[in-house]
Image (tube, rainbow, N blue to C red):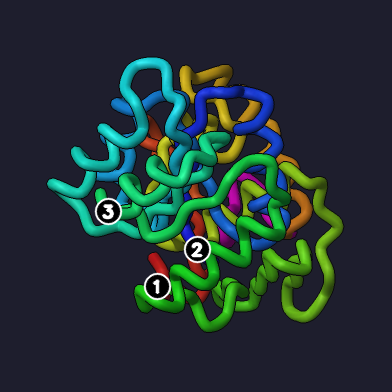
Amino acid sequence: MAQLLLIEDDERVRSALMRSLRDLGHQVSSAPDAMTGLRAAVDHRPDLVVLDLGLPDLDGSQMLRMLRGVSDVPVIVATARDDEDEIVRVLGSGADDYVVKPFTAKQLDARIQAVLRRTGGAPADPAVTVGPLRIDPRGRSAHLEGRPLDLSPKEFDLLHYLAARAGEVVAKRRLLTDVWDLPFGGADKTVDVHLAWLRRKLGETAQAPRFLHTVRGVGVKLVDPSGEAR
């Protein structure tokens, strides 16, 4: 499971690509402009950045040079620009690969896997296991003590996101940004409702949690009930 940061200004393209890449087993966060993307790349340290060049505040090639000054995170440029000189220039500025739109999510996934293999960042097994809970992002399936869980797409995304960060307290605002793709925030109630649904399917309650523990005023964390991930 790779942690990806998608920097793309077109909301429809961004949302569609995020859904497709998540379906292929990746964790994906996003940014709609260069400076937000640069801060996210530095603060959250993704495994790989997918970067559009036509950004509203700063050209993506300029952002790439700024990023290279502070990070060696692999970068795949995904853009409509197909000029050969531009491709050579961007690769020379530090991009690890360059893909021209339009492309399918599976094509981009193949490029991502290839770059991660070259840079040593490709995960051996995308499945996440926390105690008796096992989540397979590629198969979009989750099992508790060997029993399949019947999850909605968003419940699965939320559970996968928290399980991949087992033991880490995650703020609800961060969940809204990374799981619901709401970069400017949204209603915390959305997270609360989905957490309640997840708890029911995991056989627990907020008053008697096993996996999902609320840290009042901070956020929520998923832990191994045995205590190993607390």
Most frequent secondary structure within the magenta stretch = loop
Q: Residue at x 45, y 78 (%)?
A: 117
For label 2, the crowd category at 10 Å Cα-Cα, with few meaning under 14, some 14 to 19 and many 20 or more, is: many
User: Mark 2 and mark 1 in contact (Cβ < 8 Å)?
Assistant: yes
Q: Residue at x 62, y 47 (%)?
A: 158
Give, as a single range, the part of the protein colored magenta: 203-212
Tell me where residue 224 appears, x and y as whole percent: 51, 70
Q: CA distance from mark 3 to mark 1?
A: 21 Å
**Label 2: which residue?**
2
Q: Residue at x 31, y 22 (%)?
A: 58
Task: Describe the element under mark 1 as helix, strand or loop.
Answer: loop
User: Mark 1 and mark 3 in contact (Cβ < 8 Å)?
Assistant: no
Task: Describe the element under mark 2 as helix, strand or loop.
Answer: loop
Tag 1: residue type? Gly
Mark sitting earlier along the chain (3/2): 2
**Label 3: which residue?**
92
Tag on residue 121? 1
User: Mark 2 and mark 3 in contact (Cβ < 8 Å)?
Assistant: no
Q: Quadrant of the N terminus?
A: bottom right
For label 1, the crowd category at 10 Å Cα-Cα, with few meaning under 14, some 14 to 19 and many 20 or more, is: some
